[in-house]
Amino acid sequence: MAWIFVALGLVTLLLAGDFLVRGAVNLALRLGISALLVSLTVVAFGTSAPELLIVLSAMADGASGLAMGNVIGSNTANILLVLGLPALIAGLHTADFFPKKSFLLMILATVLFIGLAFFGPFTWWHGGILLAVLLSILWDQGRSAQRDRQAAKTAALVAVEEDGLEGVDPTMPGWKIALYLMFGLVGLPIGAQVLVVNAELIAKDYGVPETAIGLTLIAVGTSLPELATTTIAAFRRQGDVALGNVIGSNMFNLLAIIGIAAFVAPIPVDAAFLRFDLWIMLAASLLLFPMVFFKINFTRMWGAGLTLLYMAYLFVVLL
């Protein structure tokens, strides 16, 4: 039965990911803001909902190692797997999108998180710093949206006319956009929860340790909403949604999820995280540098490289 529920969870994730991408892109067009900004906020926060649910549940159960491992492992998976696998399958056309500022903010959030980890365990004051940084980023993104609103709307309309992007409809009514977003945001965490719970049962039957489960199985499971969303975006040629989803999700994972959880209970930082996993997370994030600053597309070759790196990481963690 566990295997059947895993398959059901995967199907739910794919359908919800399609709904969320459609809703996000059409919301951006309707509001006159960039799809990248919507992906950095609405889509990223929605696809990170499973991580928040898992971390809070783990904290309530006293499984703090699983909570921290989930966030670190999920951010690594977001770069290497969530961008790598869709690029390997269909390629990601991201050269026309330049989220330089958002990328640098993600690196800043990652470095800040690593620095605070050395002063762990994470307590309320750590959480306060992380949440304050997140609020300042959201405020800044909101200002950018207001300033560039008309230019973004014009560019979006031109893209629709020239590229004929599938699923993009400038005349789509607001209620339909809201339904797409609602089904996507609700379906993603439900699908992830069904998949993760049953996959965890299967893993425990094989005697996999808690921290390894957090870094690998649950991290991959809670990254499946991002993977589903990015895969759909790749097939729809919406690279801005894919990049914005991953960058925004990684920032949300570090700043919001751990920030909120730190107010619930202290979160100890395993010595292994300080020696290895945190630095792998940072290194994976830095791999986006050439795509962001040198206008390089995620070709199938890049996708293969990122996916192989993630497979190597899993091998080391589970060895």
Image (spheres, helix red, strand yellow):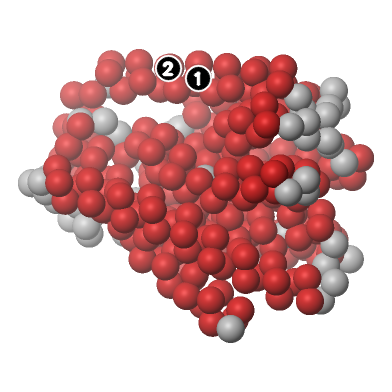
Relative to 85, say whether 156 is above or below.
Answer: above
Where is residue 203? Give x, y as percent.
Answer: 75, 71
Instruction: State the residue at coordinates (50%, 16%).
Output: 136
Where is residue 134? Give x, y as percent.
Answer: 54, 23
Of residue 103 and residue 15, the one placed in the foreground of this image is: 15
Of residue 11 and residue 263, the one placed in the foreground of this image is: 263
Q: Quadrant of the N terminus?
A: bottom right
Res 115 → quadrant: top right
How crowded is the residue under tag 1: few (<14 C-alpha within 10 Å), some, or many (20+)? few
Res 210 → quadrant: bottom right
Q: CB of mark 2 within 8 Å of CB of mark 1? A: yes
What amino acid does circle 1 point to? Leu
Instruction: State the residue at coordinates (40%, 58%).
Output: 187
Looking at the rendered structure, the secondary structure element under dot 1 is helix
Q: Is residue 261 left or right of residue 187?
A: right
Relative to 14, say whether 242 is above or below.
Answer: above
The residue wearing badge 1 is: 135
Tell me the distance, in whole angstroms, between the alpha carbons under discs 2 and 1: 6 Å
Q: Is residue 157 left or right of residue 54?
A: left
Relative to 12, say whether 240 is above or below.
Answer: above
- Numbered label attached to residue 278: none
Of residue 214 and residue 308, the one placed in the foreground of this image is: 214
Res 143 → quadrant: top left
Instruction: State the residue at coordinates (30%, 48%).
Output: 181
Q: Report how many numbered discs are placed on residues in the image.
A: 2
What amino acid does circle 2 point to? Trp
How crowded is the residue under tag 2: few (<14 C-alpha within 10 Å), some, or many (20+)? few
Q: Quadrant of the C terminus?
A: bottom right
Q: Is residue 150 left or right of residue 72?
A: left
The residue wearing badge 2 is: 139
Where is residue 239? Give x, y as percent.
Answer: 39, 49
Instruction: State the residue at coordinates (85%, 62%).
Output: 209
